[in-house]
Image: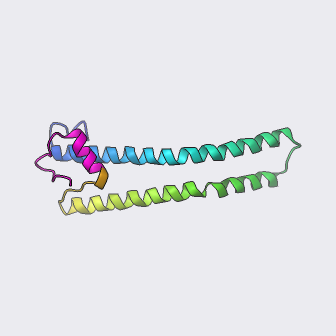
Amino acid sequence: MVLVSQKRSEYARFHAIQCLAYHIGLKAVSMVVSMPMMFYIMRDWFAEMQKMSSSAPQGPEFMFEMMGRMLAVWWPLWVFSGVLMVINLIIAIAGMVQAFRCRDFAIPLVGRLTMRWFFKEPPATVMPVA
């Protein structure tokens, strides 16, 4: 949409850039928070696997125990991703409701940054973002 709407409609271009910036920002926040947690968990998991390979063969119950411990440690990532999904759903529903009412919708922080970085002056069809 950003490439197609560039010459046709400033309104569509603003909303396309805002959507793109929002999703890139959401992905960046998700990666910055989840990557260190994943590396920490995987480090412990690899240490357990190395111990297991150097010792006598273990039965399947050991593997189930290790998987249970690993899943128990992953719960912060599940909670974090669930919170991000709920925030994303709320913003999407708010945007759809505003579009249905034929009103502009600027995501609070992203809309302001989009307007400042990509537009010299607010397009006539887009309300200025406060």
- x and y, in percent, of residue 6 in the image: 19, 37
The magenta region covers: 110-130
Would you say residue 115 sits in the magenta stretch?
A: yes
Residue found at x 78% / y 39%: 50
- x and y, in percent, of residue 102 in the image: 17, 60
- x and y, in percent, of residue 83 in the image: 47, 59
Residue found at x 27% / y 43%: 17
- x and y, in percent, of residue 63 in the image: 77, 51
- Quarter of the figure that contains the C terminus: bottom left
Vertical side of 112 occupied by 50: above or below = above
- Quarter of the figure that contains the N terminus: top left
Residue found at x 65% / y 55%: 73
Asked if residue 129 lies left or right of residue 78, the reply is: left
Would you say residue 38 sits in the magenta stretch?
A: no
Q: Nearer the viewer, residue 129 or 46?
A: 129
Asked if residue 123 lies left or right of residue 36, the reply is: left
Vertical side of 109 occupied by 17: above or below = above
Q: Nearer the viewer, residue 45 or 116?
A: 116
